[in-house]
Amino acid sequence: MVRGWAADPEVRFEGSTGGVLTALGAYLLTSGRVDFILQVKTSGSEPSFGEPTLSFSEADVFEAVGSRYGPAAPLLDIGAALDRGQPFAFIAKPCDVAALRNYAEQDERVDRLVKYCLVMVCGGFGTPQGTVDFFKRVGVDPQAVTGLRYRGRGCPGPTRVDTADGPHEYHYIDFWGEDETTWSLPFRCKICPDGIGEAADVAAADTWIGGGPNRIDSVDDPGTNALIARTRAGEELLAAAAADGALTLEYDIVPDTMSLYQPHQVNKKYAAWPRHQGLREAGRIAPQTARLRIEELAAELPEESNRFQREGTIERVRRGKASEPTPGPWVPSGDG
């Protein structure tokens, strides 16, 4: 575990936190370790969404800089990426990497061609309706939006909404709210057992004490990532990127430091098992997990805490809040 940031000041500034994933993506290409990066960039059809893209150069990687909090399906064309027969890296959410690791059981090319999996520690993605609600709160017509940058250009940097009338900038807190109770997340993210990217080679996180920025101290924050190297390959990559001048690293954090930076991840990890049990008791399917320790963590909590999570999930099922709408054409009218 280390703290770090992109050594290039421009990459650090433009990146969502310290620009580490952008810097690593560029480094993997310029060092010849991979031929391309499979990652996500802004959708060309819906500004709040992300779309999969293949990056073959530093410029391509830089074009995809910044968080995409809306829906994105980076594995949509995984077959085409594997068909190229070239070594590549994958930058995505923890659930996407877990899906790719599972897919390796069906397609042996995954383990042979995917040389590195890099993730951002994830609190969940923002629902389309939540984004529409944000536009309404700030007085922007959702149908007039031509561009959306969630963060970056500082840490967290402004949330920028482009319309025909020009750009409009807001604080990160204006989009997400003051704390996690205001986050607009799909149900799948509320029962996620792994927001911290345990299937990745490297996981990158924010470093705000308490889990979020405030409106004052974040104004001049240049951005610093907390990084977890989860494999030997990830550990070697971080060391090499630092030695070759792509990253600046500080070797002075421990697991308890991560808990200070990511308290919502601590809470969600402890809640995962009883929430899954609640789904099963309500007659619903629940995720099957391996090596994520969620049952052992739940055993550390008082039964009252586990019962609260379990019964709360059962109540969500009863009220129809444990389901998600069937996907259909996206119309940003504010009606869903």
Image (cartoon, rainbow, N blue to C red):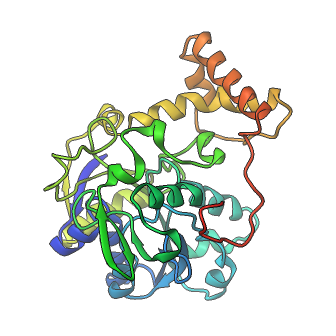
The residue positioned 51% from the left and 83% from the top of the image is 54
Q: Position of residue 259 (x, y in %)?
A: 36, 33
Q: Is residue 303 above or below residue 288?
A: above
Of residues 131 and 101, which is closer to you in this image? 131
Of residues 329 and 65, which is closer to you in this image? 329
Snapshot quadrant of residue 247? bottom left
Is 119 left or right of 158, judged from the image as shown? Answer: right
Q: Is residue 285 above or below residue 100?
A: above
Q: Position of residue 301 (x, y in %)?
A: 54, 16
Of residues 89 and 280, which is closer to you in this image? 280
Is 264 left or right of 297, judged from the image as shown? Answer: left
In the picture as drawn, the residue positioned furthest to the right comes out as 283
Q: How many marks?
A: 0
Of residues 129 and 115, which is closer to you in this image? 129
Q: Is residue 69 above or below residue 254?
A: below
Q: Is residue 72 above or below residue 56?
A: above
Quadrant of image for the C terminus? bottom right
The residue positioned 20% from the left and 67% from the top of the image is 243
Q: Residue 280: in sight, yes or no?
A: yes
The residue positioned 41% from the left and 61% from the top of the image is 139
Is 231 left or right of 326, judged from the image as shown? Answer: left
Q: Position of residue 198 (x, y in %)?
A: 51, 48
Snapshot quadrant of residue 209? top left
The residue positioned 53% from the left and 74% from the top of the image is 143
Q: Position of residue 42 (x, y in %)?
A: 47, 76
Is 13 left or right of 182, judged from the image as shown? Answer: left
Q: Residue 205: in sight, yes or no?
A: no
